[in-house]
Amino acid sequence: MGPSEMKESLINLKLEPRRFQDARGWYALAIWGDRPPEQVGFFATKEEAEEWIAEVLSIWTRFKGNAPKQANESERFRRP
C-alpha cells in the first residue's frame, strides 16, 4: 500500500460499539480501509462507548477537513 492509499484508508474511519463476548463491557470496533478491524477502549456501558465514538468522530471529521489534499501535499513541502 502506497502513502496516498494509506492516507485514504485512514481517512475512512468507522467506529461501532460492540459488547465483549463475555459480557464484561463494551468496546469500539475500529474499521478503516484494508486493515483488520481493531478493538479500541473498554467501556462499562453501550452509552459510554457511543459517547466516546461520537467525540472521536467529531475530532476525526475536523481533522479530515484540515488535512492537505493529496495533489497539493508535495507542493506544500517543496523547497523554493
Image (tube, helix red, strand yellow):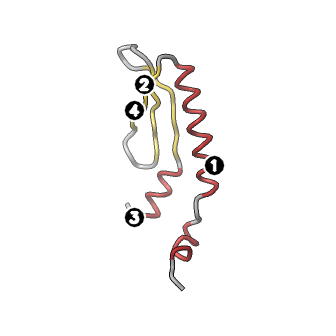
The extreme bottom residue here reads: 80
Q: Do the residues under discs 1 and 4 have CB atoms within 8 angstroms?
A: no
- At 43% from the left and 17% from the top, the residue drawn is 25
Q: Position of residue 41 (x, y in %)?
A: 43, 29
Kindly state the secondary structure of the residue where label 1 is placed. helix
Q: Which of pointers 3 and 1 lies earlier in the amino acid sequence?
A: 3
Cα separation, mark 3 vs mark 1, equals 24 Å
Which amino acid, by three-letter code, is at mark 1? Arg
Q: Do the residues under discs 2 and 4 have CB atoms within 8 angstroms?
A: no
- The mark found on residue 62 in the picture is 1
- Asked if residue 4 is positioned above or below residue 24 in the image, the reply reads below
Across the whole image, how many numbered discs are drawn on residues?
Answer: 4
Cα separation, mark 1 vs mark 2, equals 24 Å
- At 48% from the left and 58% from the top, the residue drawn is 7
How crowded pointer 4 is (Cα within 10 Å; few <14, some 14-19, many 20+) is rated as some
How crowded pointer 1 is (Cα within 10 Å; few <14, some 14-19, many 20+) is rated as few
Which amino acid, by three-letter code, is at mark 4? Gln
Q: Which residue is mark 4?
A: 39
